[in-house]
Image: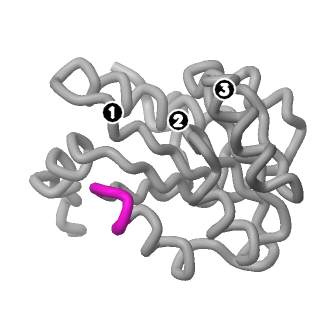
Amino acid sequence: MASKNQLFESRTQFIATRGVKEYRETIPVWVHSDDVVLEIGCEWGTTTTLIAPQCKKIIGTDISSKCIERARKMYPELHFQVLDGFDVGAALELGEPFTKIYIDISGMSGYNALLDTIALLTSYATVLRPEAIIVKSGALKRFTAHCTAWRSPRN
């Protein structure tokens, strides 16, 4: 059994949203003028453009080079990068002190997708150590709605 000293204790907060409306509603609450934001799964950059005026810097990423090409044409003033969201090392190589990470993985569903999502969030929290990760995942939101962290009563 691992001791408390051996366990990773993340200070990253995870915010689970379902649907684009909830995902975007988090922006004025979670994004501040001094934040450096990484958006994973930006597709054509629509949410990136909503985050950009609220923060110091944002990089929108997507695995699809066609999506990134389109985002760059539509929003040339913003920074977009082709990136596989499951390659945390590539995100680290961007060389930015990301304080917030937005992840749109709503296309993943099912039990294995939930496990993959939790593993992905843990990886980003461990490697990049942002203050918060806002994730669009109906499966994760449904799961966390039924979770309660146990705290032992103090004697």
Residue drawn 88% across the image and 58% down it: 77
User: Which amino acid is tagged 2?
Assistant: Phe
Quarter of the picture holding the C terminus: bottom left
Q: Nearer the viewer, residue 123 or 31?
A: 31
Q: Looking at the picture, does residue 102 appear above or below residue 2?
A: below
Residue on which disc 1 sits = 107
Give the amino acid at mark 1: Gly
Query: Mark 2 vs mark 3: which is more N-terminal?
Result: 2
Measured in 3D between alpha carbons, the distance from the residue under mark 2 to the one under mark 3, in whole angstroms, is 37 Å
Residue 2 seen in the current view = yes
Q: Judging from the image, what secondary structure is the residue with disc 1 in?
A: loop
Q: Is residue 154 left or right of residue 26?
A: left
Q: Quarter holding the N terminus?
A: top left
Q: Amino acid at mark 3?
A: Lys
Q: Main secondary structure of the magenta part?
A: helix
Residue under the image location 76 percent in, 67 percent down: 35
Q: What span is in magenta?
A: 18-22
Looking at marks 2 and 1 on the same chain, the residue that comes earlier in the sequence is marked by 2
Question: Which quadrant would residue 61 be assigned to in this image?
Answer: top right
Q: Tag on residue 66?
A: 3
Q: Residues within 10 Å of mark 2 (few under 14, many from 20)?
A: few
Is 20 magenta? The answer is yes
Contact check, label 1 and label 3, Cβ < 8 Å: no
Residue at 73 percent across and 21 percent down: it is 89
Real-space Cα separation, disc 2 to disc 1, in angstroms: 29 Å
Residue to which mark 2 is pinned: 8
